[in-house]
Image (cartoon, rainbow, N blue to C red):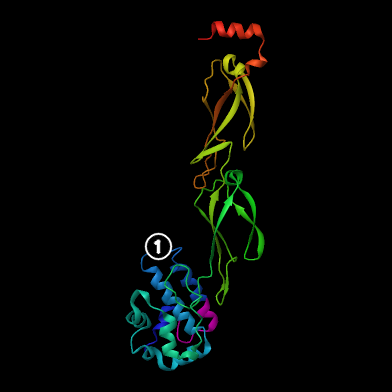
C-alpha cells in the first residue's frame, strides 16, 4: 500500500515523531521560498508542510497508516491536492473532506506569508522594516529594537546597505516545529553631513576664504578618525580631496572604500572687514 507522505518527508513508515520533525525542519529550510528561488520550491514547501500536518498528529497518522494513499483515491498526495484545486488549492478544505470536520486543521488565519493560504504549519517568520542610523550602517554595532512585545539588541554588520535583510534566529512566531526567525529589511537614515555611493563616502566641510585663497591646514572629524587636511592655495569651491580607506567596508572583500572631502568656501560678511580692505577688494577683485 503506497504511502507517499512518508516519501515526501524522506522518512520511513516506522519513523519516530522526532525523526519526522527533524526531517521536516531540514526540508522546510531547503525549500522555503525565502531561500530557494526555484519556481517549484514553493509547491514543494507546501507539500512538505501538508505531510507534516498529518504525520505529526497521532490520530491523523494512525488513519493514514491504516488507509495510505487510498485516502486520496489511490493518487499520491501531491497529485490529489493539485487535482482538487489547481494552483489555488485550499488544503484546509480538502483535508477536512478526508478526515471530516473533526479533523481539526488550523484555521485559514494561519496561512503562509507568501500567499496560497494553506492552514498547515504557518510561515513562522516575522518580516519587518528597520531604519538604522547612517553611522551604524557604516561602522556597524548594536541596535536596540522592540517588536512583538520583545526587546533586544541586534548586531548590525559594518557596511550594510539599504535593502539588505538581517535574519535574527528564533525571534519569529512559535509553532510545532519550533520558532521562526525575524527578517529585518534595512533602510538607512539620511545624514546631513555624509552621502554614500557604494563603498565611498562624501562629506562637505566649511573652508574659510583665507585658507582657500592662501592655503593652510584644517582638521576635519570623520566617522573613523579626525584627519588633518592640507589645503593648497587657490582652492576652488566644491573641490574634492580624496582620503583613502576612510569610507565603507565592503562586506564581501573586506576592503575599505574612500572618503571624499568636498569644500564649501565660507565668505566673510563685509561688515566684518575694514573699510580699507573693502576698498582694496572692490578695486582689485575681477
In the rendered image, residue 14 lying in the magenta stretch gets the answer yes
Q: Nearer the viewer, residue 190 or 150?
A: 190
Secondary structure beneath dot 1 equals loop
Q: Residues within 10 Å of mark 1 (few under 14, many from 20)?
A: few
In the image, is residue 55 part of the stretch drawn in magenta? no
- In the image, taking residue 134 as reference, residue 253 lies left or right, namely left
- Residue occupying image coordinates x 51% and y 49%: 162
Where is residue 136 drawn, in percent x and y? 61, 46
- What count of labels does the image hold? 1
List x then y, in percent, for residue 208: 62, 21
- Residue 31 in the image: above or below residue 161: below
Q: Is residue 15 above or below residue 41?
A: below
Q: Residue at x 63, y 19 (%)?
A: 269
Residue 7, x across and y down, in percent: 41, 80
Q: Locate residue 154: give its quadrant.
A: bottom right
- Image coordinates of residue 93 in percent, x first then y, are 42, 83
* Stretch of the chain drawn in magenta: 10-21
Q: Please state if 91 lies on the left or on the right of 284 as rendered.
A: left
**Residue on which the image places disc 1:** 37
The furthest residue to the bottom:
66
In the image, residue 108 above or below residue 187: below
Quarter of the picture containing the N terminus is: bottom left
Amino acid at each position: 500500500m503506497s504511502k507517499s507522505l512518508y516519501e515526501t518527508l524522506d522518512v520511513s513508515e516506522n519513523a519516530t515523531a522526532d525523526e519526522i520533525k527533524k526531517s521536516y525542519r531540514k526540508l522546510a529550510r531547503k525549500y522555503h521560498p525565502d531561500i530557494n528561488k526555484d519556481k517549484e520550491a514553493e509547491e514543494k514547501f507546501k507539500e512538505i508542510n501538508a505531510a507534516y500536518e498529518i504525520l505529526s498528529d497521532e490520530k491523523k497518522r494512525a488513519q493514514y497508516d491504516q488507509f495510505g494513499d487510498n485516502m486520496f483515491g489511490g493518487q499520491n498526495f501531491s497529485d490529489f491536492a493539485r487535482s482538487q484545486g489547481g494552483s489555488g488549492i485550499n488544503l484546509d478544505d480538502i483535508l477536512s473532506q478526508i478526515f471530516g470536520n473533526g479533523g481539526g486543521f488550523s484555521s485559514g488565519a494561519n496561512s503562509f506569508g507568501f500567499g496560497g493560504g494553506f492552514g498547515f504549519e504557518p510561515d513562522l517568520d516575522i518580516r519587518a522594516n528597520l531604519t538604522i542610523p547612517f553611522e551604524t550602517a557604516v561602522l556597524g554595532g548594536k541596535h536596540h529594537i522592540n517588536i512583538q512585545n520583545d526587546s533586544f539588541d541586534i548586531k548590525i554588520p559594518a557596511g550594510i546597505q539599504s535593502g539588505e535583510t538581517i535574519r535574527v534566529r528564533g525571534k519569529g512566531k512559535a509553532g510545532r516545529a519550533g520558532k521562526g526567525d525575524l527578517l529585518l529589511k534595512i533602510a538607512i537614515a539620511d545624514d546631513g553631513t555624509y552621502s554614500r555611493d557604494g563603498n565611498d563616502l562624501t562629506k562637505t566641510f566649511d573652508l574659510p576664504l583665507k585658507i582657500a585663497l592662501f592655503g593652510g591646514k584644517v582638521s576635519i572629524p570623520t566617522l573613523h578618525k579626525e584627519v588633518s587636511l592640507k589645503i593648497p592655495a587657490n582652492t576652488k569651491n566644491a573641490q574634492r580631496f580624496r582620503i583613502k580607506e576612510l569610507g565603507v567596508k565592503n562586506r564581501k572583500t573586506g576592503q575599505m572604500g574612500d572618503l571624499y572631502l568636498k569644500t564649501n568656501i565660507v565668505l566673510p560678511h563685509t561688515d566684518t572687514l575694514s573699510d580699507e580692505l573693502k576698498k582694496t577688494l572692490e578695486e582689485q577683485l575681477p
